[in-house]
Structure formats: C-alpha cells, structure tokens
Image (spheres, helix red, strand yellow):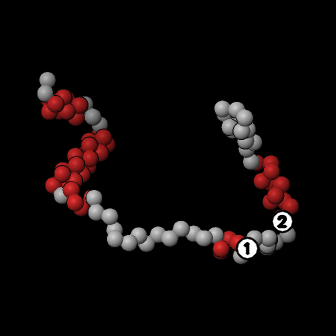
Amino acid sequence: MTLKEQLMQEIESMPEELLAEVLHFASSIQVKRENPQAFTEVPAKLTYRPASGRSILRHAGTWQGDDFDECLQMVYDTRSQAKFDEHNLIE
C-alpha cells in the first residue's frame, strides 16, 4: 500500500474535527515548502528587553491594607511542601 493510499484510508475514518486540523496542517506544510524564507527570517532587532525588577523593588517592604497577617497565614496554609531530598519534590 502506498503512502497516499494509507493516508486516504486514515482520512476516511477520521471525524470532521480532525479533518479540519489535518487540512490546516497540510496547507501550512505546502506554504512553508513554497516560501521557506518567510519562516526562517529573524527580525533585525528584537524589541523585547528583559525586566530589571526595579519596579518591583520600589514596592518592596510596603503593604497597603490591614490584612497582612491574614494573607500571610493563607499563604502558609495553602502552599505545597517541597522536599528536595526525594525524587518526588511535591506531595
């Protein structure tokens, strides 16, 4: 059985949702094959600049509100306990 025959056999047994995905995939492969440069070009200058953290540091040590103890207790009550000496780090 040829690859095309195998593919046709699989397609005939697929539900409509999967057929839509297969069609989209096949179309994208064809576009990439016809115009490979459109997918390999890298922008000359990246616009992303990693955050410095300065904006967070401006707020360090400050807390607005009177619920600090309540919020801190909620964190203690709901966080996972990590164990770094075992294979399973979180129980």
Helix, strand, or loop for circle 1?
loop
Left or right, 73 with respect to 55, comes to right
30, above or below 66, in the image: above
x, y percent for residue 77? 80, 48
| Residues packed near mark 2 inside 10 Å, few (<14), some (14 to 19) or many (20 plus) | few
Q: Where's residue 74, x and y in %?
A: 80, 54
Image position, residue 12 (x, y; %): 21, 32
Q: Which residue is mark 2?
A: 67
Residue at 68%, 71% (x, y): give it.
56
The one nearer the camera, 39 or 14, is 39
Q: Residue at x 22, y 35 (%)?
A: 11
Q: Is residue 71 visible?
A: yes
Say what amino acid the circle numbered 1 marks.
His
Residue 60 placement, left or right of 55: right
Residue 59: image tag: 1
The C terminus sits in image quarter: top right
The front one of 86 and 73 is: 86
Q: Amino acid at mark 2?
A: Asp
Q: CA distance from mark 2 to mark 1?
A: 17 Å
Query: In the rendered image, which quarter contains the N terminus?
Result: top left
